[in-house]
Image (cartoon, grey):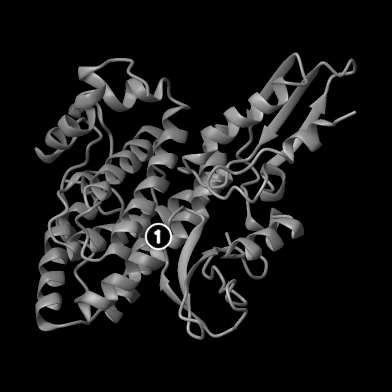
Amino acid sequence: MVTAWQILETVPDPEIPVLSVVDLGIVRDVQESGDGRAVTVTLTPTYSGCPATEVIMRDVRTALEASYDVVEVHTRLSPAWTTDWLSEAGRQKLQNFGIAPPSGRTTLPLVDVGAPATCPHCGASDVEELSAFGSTPCKALWRCVSCREPFDYMKRH
Amino acid sequence: MVSATSELRIPSVPELADGCLVLSHRLSEWMSNAPTMEEDVAMGNIALDLLGQARGLLQTLGDENELAYFREAQDFRNPVICELPNDDYGFTLLRQLLVDAWLSLVWPALAASADDERVRGVAEKAIKENAYHLRHSSAWVVRLGDGTDESHSRMLTALEALWPYRGEIASDAWYDVIEPILFEATLPKLPRDAWTQRSSADGWHTEHLSYLLAEMQSLARAHPGATW
């Protein structure tokens, strides 16, 4: 039997489609009813204003409704999402996709968002920041000094 | 006139929600107009974070769309500094520093002690987002303040124009955050006890808020309930 977690592993992040919502670490709780017909999923959004959040909630509901009669999707804000919750598989998928995964663990107060360990294109470690802000709230824009390619870095958050 | 109290005053939820919403709109006005493409993206990102924070807070007060789009200027409680027009990029970033510094004190206080669990959740998330904003605004204030004669002169003008509007956000802790950054930016230390503008607590605003709202609210008012 396919479990709710297995279904959730097929739901992609709409902005970084190589990551599932499980890889992203935003699925905080899954409760199935005793008869297996109802499921309640609790999600924690990544960033306050991330427009992907509403799409993800809808996609999660749609995916689960194929297997459950009753689907509830809740939001839980606390504890706040952190990139520490990205799965190891997710980090590898990011690197392979051309996005450098967050380096190291998040510490508060957040004065340092880390730096990519290596260029996701050529693997060189000589990289520099182009802009602290990138194409989505979770990313910054970096470039490789070695191969000259720009790339996204998922900020430690 | 607001007395620039020494203790940090924790803003009400409407005050904070409206502050985030109005400042978000101001920053979004830079989109496609910022001095560089990277800054265009930065403004968009910061505006988006502020909008998300505003939404999270407004949802604890009622219908977020009703509150954002169908109130009049005198119903808004944002700190007046948030509604001031952007002027040049230096003014925008200096205002951002002053507000980011305020939020760097407000969010942790709310995360620890807000009565409403949802407000604590928004605040907990916002702590990290704001730290990133503060890093950005601080870096720009230093770069422009300690930059060319032209940029320094503009930052000085911006500081003098913004200083009277600090009343709603200032505290000893706040001065302690901004003063080292202004010092590094070679900008003067202005007196803590100088005159400050009155607050929006009784619905008073500058004329600028009405124009901002006219633009922000026009679509929702022309097409009530519209979705896409």
Relative to B197, is A152 above or below?
below
Name the spot of residue A140 as percent of width and height, x first: 47, 64
Where, quadrant-wise, is the C terminus of chain B in this rendering?
top left
Name the spot of residue B55 as percent of width and height, x first: 42, 34
Q: Amino acid at mark 1?
A: His
Name the spot of residue B137 as percent of width and height, x first: 33, 65
Q: How many marks?
A: 1
Q: Is residue A132 visible?
A: yes
- Disc 1 crowd rating (10 Å Cα; few below 14, some 14-19, many 20+) is many
Relative to B155, is B195 above or below?
above
Q: Is residue B6 visible?
A: no
From the image, tell me which residue sits under label 1.
B133
Q: Residue at x 22, y 53 (%)?
A: B30
SS of the residue under disc 1: helix
Relative to B109, is A157 above or below?
below
Q: Is residue B57 left or right of residue B157?
A: right
Q: In this rendered view, identify the residue nearer to me: B119 or A84.
A: A84
Name the spot of residue A125 as percent of width and height, x first: 59, 83
Q: Residue at x 71, y 63 (%)?
A: A92
Q: Residue at x 51, y 40 (%)?
A: A52
Q: Residue at x 63, y 40 (%)?
A: A44
Q: Chain of mark 1?
A: B
Q: Is residue A155 left or right of residue B131?
A: right
Q: Is residue A131 left or right of residue B147?
A: right
